[in-house]
Amino acid sequence: MVSNDDYVKKILEQILDSHNIIQNLKDNSGDLDVIKKELLKINGFFRVLVKKLETENFQFGDLLELQSKAKNYLENYYFVQEIDTMSSLYSNDPNRIKNMRLKILEAFQDKRLIDKIEELIEKL
C-alpha cells in the first residue's frame, strides 16, 4: 500500500514533469497544443492534491502551505481559454507562443509555487 507521503510526492513529480515540458518548449508551431495538454494535467493534479490534503489529516506544515498555494493557482490562473483563442489565430506565431508560455511559467513563480513543489519532493 502506498503511503500518503508517497502518493503526494508522485503527484508533485508529475506536476514538475509537466512544468518542465512547458519550460523546455521551443515555441514552435503545435506547441500550444502541448502547453494546453500539460496545463490540463497540472490543473487536474492540483485539484487532486488539494482534495487529498483536505480529506486527510496532514500535520506537515509544508503540505498545508502547498495546499494554500495550489488553491491560489487554481483560483487565479486558468490559461486554457486563452490558448484556445490563440490556437485559431496565432498557432504559427513563435513570439505569441513564447509570450503565452512565459506568462504560464510566471504564474508558477507566483507565491513561489514551483519552488515549494521542488522543495517538498526533496523532503518527502
Image (cartoon, helix red, strand yellow):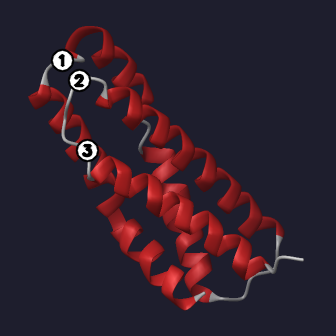
Q: Residue at the spot x=66%, y=61% of the render?
A: 49
Above or below 28: residue 93:
above
Q: How many marks?
A: 3
- Within-10-Å neighbours for mark 1: few <14, some 14–19, many 20+: some
- Within-10-Å neighbours for mark 3: few <14, some 14–19, many 20+: some
Can you name the residue that lies furthest to the top here? 88
Circle 3 is placed at which residue position?
Answer: 25
Specify the label residue 73 is tagged with: none
Above or below 74: residue 52:
below
**Is mark 1 in CB contact (under 8 Å) with mark 2?**
yes
What kind of residue is marked 2? Ser
What kind of residue is marked 3? Leu
Q: Residue at the spot x=40%, y=34% of the render?
A: 34
Residue 100: x percent and y percent?
Answer: 23, 35
Residue 20: x percent and y percent?
Answer: 36, 57
Residue 88: x percent and y percent?
Answer: 31, 9
Upstream in the sequence, badge 1 or badge 2? 2
- Residue 7 falls in image quadrant: bottom right
Residue 59: x percent and y percent?
Answer: 72, 88
- Residue 5 falls in image quadrant: bottom right
Circle 2 is placed at which residue position?
Answer: 29
**Where does the N terminus fall, quadrant-wise?**
bottom right
Circle 1 is placed at which residue position?
Answer: 92
